[in-house]
Image (tube, grey):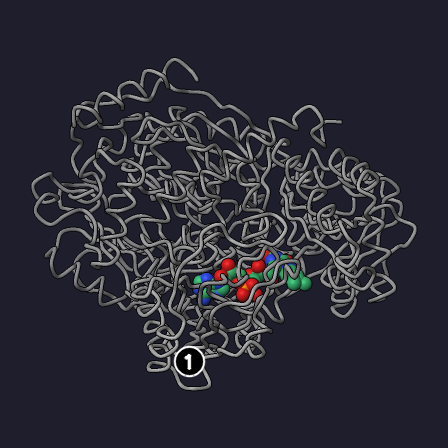
Amino acid sequence: MSTLVEEWSEQVRAAARSGAHLAIRGGGSKRFYGGEERGEVLAVGGYQGIVAYEPTELVVTARAGTLLAELNQVLAERGQWLAFEPPACGPTATVGGMLASGLSGPRRQTSGAVRDFVLGVRILNGLAEVLSFGGQVMKNVAGYDVSRLMAGSLGTLGLVLEVSFKVLPLPVAEKSLRFSLGEAAALEKLNQWAGRPLPISASAWHDDVLTLRLSGAAAAVTAAGRTLGGEALDDSAALAFWQAVREQQHAFFAGEAPLWRLSLPSLAPCQKLGPTFIEWGGAQRWLRGGDPQEIRRAAEMAGGHATLFRADAALKAAVGVFQPLSAPLARIHRQLKLAFDPSGVFNPGRMYPDL
Amino acid sequence: MSSATGLPDQRFTVDRAVLISRLRAVLPAHALLADEEEMRPYDCDGLTAYRHLPLLVALPEDEAQTQAVLRICHALHAPVVARGAATGLSGGATPHPDGVVVSLAKLKKIVKLDPLARTAVVQPGVRNLAVSEAAAPYGLYYAPDPSSQIACTIGGNVAENAGGVHCLKYGLTVHNVLRVRGLTIEGDVVEFGSAALDAAGYDLLALINGSEGLLAMISEITVRLTPKPELAQVVIASFADVRKAGDAVASIIGAGIIPAGLEMMDKKAIHAVEPYVNAGYDMNAEAILLCESDGTPEEVAEEIGRMTAVIEKSGASMIRVSQNEAERLKFWAGRKAAFPAVGRMTPDYLCMDGTIPRKHLAEMLEAIGHLSEKYGLRCANVFHAGDGNLHPLIMYDANQPGELERAAAFGADILELSVRFGGTITGEHGVGLEKVMLMAEQFSTAEIAAFHRLKAAFDEAGLLNPGKGIPTLARCREYTQARAGNAAGAPGQA
Ligand SMILES: Cc1cc2nc3c(=O)[nH]c(=O)nc-3n(C[C@H](O)[C@H](O)[C@H](O)COP(=O)(O)OP(=O)(O)OC[C@H]3O[C@@H](n4cnc5c(N)ncnc54)[C@H](O)[C@@H]3O)c2cc1C
């Protein structure tokens, strides 16, 4: 075991004994997300390095503190990438934080999310045990799928030490198209197109403009471009646009009004709850401001859920960051937390107040 | 389990008469089987080496009846084993001698198919292929296609996180399921995932996939449907050397191609399949590779060109490309019939399911060859080459004393080797009863203990499929000690 991991184990044991809390921090780029950090900061950014990378196996393994930018760079050199386009939310983003926050980018609608690409993890649990789950192979059903469970768990189940991801080749060709469409019409089109074998890899609607990105083999992208019509964006403008969507640098995301993320069935009708930005073929809808109770109710009615993605601490504390769970689910969540972190050492309150 | 009989360690004391009378009150008369003769067809799954009669078999006809059965079993502390189509190959649905088999076979309604949303809501007993058939008129299908897809159920697929020959590109069950509605052993309804792409809280949907009936009873599933590609074509390549075939796989992926399917078969498998299916396979080849491309006609033409170039360079002795849909299906029919074809050559066979990093393939096949000689048992190999998932089919005759034990030891050696190569003991068939002891090969005692705590978070009483999936800590210790004793002569070291 590396000395760093030994030190952390000792810190975890001490915290468990004294009832203290530890706030796991990678690069701090996603501190805005989830409940407020509580307890002594456990900085893991120093635990860096790509442990194994074999392009022909489509697998990369990295320590949790590795900079996301570095990982992206190393993969790009071999013509590969993390196909779920994780947003970094800043230059300090680490691989561990990316996994723990579970955030996926524009390509999620077709490629899948962080959890779909996780193959294995090594973690330090609340009993200060180093445990490995999953592995470095594509298919693995030995034991429960704890690796995927870590995605989006916000560090509440343990400290992620190392992660293995499935990687994919970069698309050969890309092309972005723009259409003038109102919200309802855009939603209808997006759902219709998604039912056809078209290489649509991302979509963004805002202010009566729908932007589509096509990715894949050159022949497929060209053919789909002809089928769909619209107005083509030039390549550099397209790149800048999708980067801005992925990193929430688009003008829609500026300013102080609370930012809500609604995860809904792609067919859910227009919500008419405030200024809206739609991604993932209709399945991810961003909202500015609005009445928290009304937003949560609307999301639930539509078959989805609402997350208070960015807001000040007071509002987050008042309404909670994540949609409340049903009673049986809440019970399973508490029991799972106890199974991994019985003394409640890690990131208390980062996800739900009682976890 | 105790090795030869497959009987679980943990026994339960259940008053059968009380159980019968309480279940009769909540189930129609024909939905509860209690006679030995009636229960006989339920005594095993696809792993026929282990058979036990359960106390009772319940065949609920809706979710409410299923819920009522669970509540009664919970109250009477009776183990519950869920059963789909029983095509499972690891003994996941093998009955517990003190428990109730709950067959979901009667819950086979497609509740809703929404072509615009590209989803289908199905009951757990719906067959895998039935979903694709129902979706076909809309140009959609359900992507995971296990070779057993005519028979196996979506509930069983979720419980095993089943794969198929197209999962390198289209994903496993876990990637194609949006929502699972489940019942806890207490009978509470829980929704894992949602009709959206994610749900609030922990990703419990990921845990339910592959949970082998140990965490919850699955009562409804929402699956994602995929648009059918306009065209698919498959390249079939022969190799005079398995190593070259293995290298071809790495070269294809190295060239940035993700084939829609990438499968390999060795000579024994080809010779089992060809006389049975007449798929047109090259009987002189040491290995054949099936490599599929799908998409728009332009895309497929471009990709097939690149694939054949790479395969040629890897030293294939013969390359053919399917010229029409009928021929494509014929090429695949051989691969999909590999298990029954081998089944014709031998009274019994065990199907192994290790996954390894692909670079170790040639080494693995050589080691299997040596083990085959050592144990005096034939073995054919089919391989989901794209994702490193190997299915050695070990042939034996259960009526010959000692052969089952030899076959099991052969299989265990292969799986230990898989772990040593950095892989896993099971890629898609599950641990079940068969590989429960081998879990100790892959996981430390602390990791096994963590699995037990995780299970208890869902099923505190430990009534859902006890004895499967995760070994008791006592068994782990025994296993580790026995292995340590044998270490000097451990197979696969050679
Ligand atoms: C010829 C052949 C080919 C095969 N090919 C493949 C393949 O290509 N890929 C692959 O992955 N597998 C394959 N299999 C294995 C098997 O078909 C799969 O594991 C399948 O998913 C099992 O489905 P089933 O309905 O038969 O489940 P069963 O065998 O009945 O049950 C399997 C497990 O799931 C649990 N279970 C079943 N239903 C439920 C439910 N509703 N709720 C909770 N738990 C439940 C059972 O308790 C058991 O543990 C093959 C098997 C055969 C015989």
- Tally of numbered discs: 1
| Residue A255: % across, % down | 16, 41
| Residue A37: % across, % down | 18, 31
Q: Seen in the image, is A35 located left or right of residue A1?
A: left
Q: Amino acid at mark 1?
A: Glu
The image shows residue A155, relative to residue B44, as above or below, that is above
Is residue B165 visible to the viewer in this orientation of the structure?
yes
Which residue is located at x 30 percent, y 60 percent? A264
Which residue is at the front of the view, A290 or A129? A129
Is residue B142 visible to the viewer in this orientation of the structure?
no
Under tag 1, what secondary structure?
loop
In which chain is the residue bearing label 1?
Answer: B
Q: Quadrant of the C terminus of chain B?
A: top right
For disc 1, the marked residue is: B61
Which residue is located at x 58 percent, y 34 percent? A79
Which residue is at the front of the view, B238 or A24? A24
Which residue is located at x 18 percent, y 46 percent? A321
